[in-house]
Image: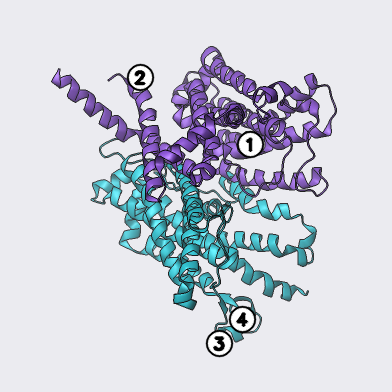
Chain colours: A purple, B cyan
Amino acid sequence: MSKRVVNILVPLISILLGLIIGAIVMAVSGFNPINGYVALWNGIFMDTYTMGETIRQITPYVFSGLAVAFAFRTGLFNIGVEGQLIMGWLAAAWVGQAFELPAVVHVPLALIAAAAAGALWAFIPGLLKAKLQVHEVIVTIMMNYTALHVANALIGVISGGQERTDSIHESASLRSPFLESITDYSRMHWGFVIALIAVMIMWFILQKTTLGYELKAVGFNKNASEYAGMNVNKNIILAMLISGAFAGLGGAMEALGTFENMSKLHAATGIGFDGIAVALLGANQPFGVLLGAILFGALKYGGLNMPSEAGVPTEIVSIVIALIIFFVASGYIIRVALERFGKKRKEEK
Amino acid sequence: MSFLDVLYFIIPSAIFYAAPLILTAIGGVFTERSGVVNIGLEGIMIVGAASSIIFNLSFADQLGNATPWVGLIVAMGFGILLSLILAVAAVSLRADQTVSGVALNMLGLAVAVFTVKMIFDKGQTDSITERFSRFDIPVLGDIPILGKMFFVDVYATSILAIVVAIVAWFVIYKTPFGLRLRAVGEHPMAADTMGVNVTKMRYVAVMISGALGGIGGAIYAQAISGNFGASTISGQGFMAIAAMIFGKWHPLGALGAALFFGFAQALSVAGGSIPYVQDVPKIFLLILPYVLTILALAGFIGKAHAPKASGVPYVKGKR
């Protein structure tokens, strides 16, 4: 079996195994797994409203997945997407409600603010990694909770002690009457177009620019890149900045599309952590990330239909996603199994 | 309030808030010393908290006062069970340890909330009736000033946490087991050559962290929150990881760091009634543990070095 086929088979087998174990968990808990999965399916595809909402859910996952994947290509593990996304959300919500501008200026300004806030939050771990060789995993985790508390405090300041910021002005909103009319008044917004553009941008940077070539080279082998004359430190910081910008834009989707404001958060949003799953499943390729985001976003939104239609707690979806990550991460064993299987077939021939 | 009154109030509650952090951080020390990064401590704490609360609610009538203690043992069991998933993935199947840890957090939260919804038909449990209670230590409690600070109205869980930290120090630095554990985390190949079973050591270490993380979560649930919901444990596990790093991967260092973080938490909860502290915005106290950890890692507060082989799966015969 060629390497390419194996690389595609590993995530597919992982998804299948995750769904099978999910079914077993449902059966053991006294639910009918078929009803459960039918409810999941209906939760995604039942009518135009659910489909609109599913796309709405997928949109921030694309960004968080791209953020994790982009850093990964430079050999960095950005667990801080969660925090960068929160900061981006806050920045976009603030720009959206604080200024009154024409939409052509307002939307881009809010997006740029979100990207900048996310990038700034990612800059700190990037700088520490580049200059002081501090491992980025722990720093980004610590930055997540710092972001959570800082954002909550700032929401209090912006809103004058309220639990949420004021709604953004219509000129900054990504929602549109057109999308509402074709999806039966779902919260679907134009963010999905921006997400698709972001996928293209990541592909373009990595495949068509010198910067992308250098970033990938640093990811493959830092010392060789240094020897070849590349500035490794600069590339590490740049990779974190771009990764953080993607994460911040993911937050902007929530601020300008889904919620049109920001409420104080009691716990992490989970979008950033799910981004790790998305990137892993997508093998850190831009188009793979898109597919991963579609799968996990659809599962997450469809899962909300499971309690009402089949009585199954929606957390079953998170269990399935966690299992899929385990299986993809433990891909070694699947690869070994596939190789054995491939060899046997060759011998038979 | 006089300064002394403040101390009488803040020191016991600091130790109270620190207990779950101490235990979980010590668990983290064990895994990291063996060369496995356990980001999944948060998930383990969540499962520990949920299982202890469910057990407590179900058996409080039969077991009475002993319920929370048996709850700790139950939580320990579930913590070990969950940590085994990480051990299988990260040690045997050579999965990326950070990724498996993240998945473990997701799985822990999902399984816990799933089970709670199954049993209670809602996302949050009822409040438990049998909590950990305070008691006065005889004789020591009569010491002037210090007695009232440390030995009056203490929680047995706080004492347990401190004892575990000291035992962990002894085990890691004074026993053959500890020597092997550290060897496996610093240079697994050398340890393997000397006949130490790297896989077994790492399994044991991960399971110890599962046990301690489970207990930590159970103490948080049964002493501090009193019930379980999706946001009961929110960042406690990560704060324990912070304590472990701030304590430089040393059990007693982790103990000190966890006590300090507990102090910050106590101040953020009760700071409103304390002079001077009430003028400090709460946000600074909330982010203090995380910011200090970043500073410690950056080398501004002494240099922190992780065990050399931490995070690297060991493949026999590979250089």
Q: Which residue is mark 3?
A: B139
Q: Is residue B16 visible?
A: yes
Q: Are marks 3 and 4 on the same chain?
A: yes
Mark whose residue sits in front, 1 or 3: 1
* Chain on which label 4 sits: B
Q: Is residue B253 left or right of residue B32?
A: right
| Relative height, residue A310 to residue B50 (above, below) | above
Point out residue A115 in the picture as x, y percentages from the top left corner.
Answer: 68, 28
Q: Are marks 2 and 3 on the same chain?
A: no
Question: Which amino acid type corresponds to the residue marked 3 in the rendered image?
Answer: Val
> Label 4 near label 3: C-beta < 8 Å?
no
Point out residue B134 in the picture as x, y percentages from the top left corner.
Answer: 57, 77
Q: Is residue A266 left or right of residue B277?
A: left
The CA span between labels 2 and 1 is 33 Å
* Chain on which label 1 sits: A
Q: Which residue is mark 2?
A: A4
> Label 3 near label 2: C-beta < 8 Å?
no
The CA span between labels 3 and 4 is 9 Å
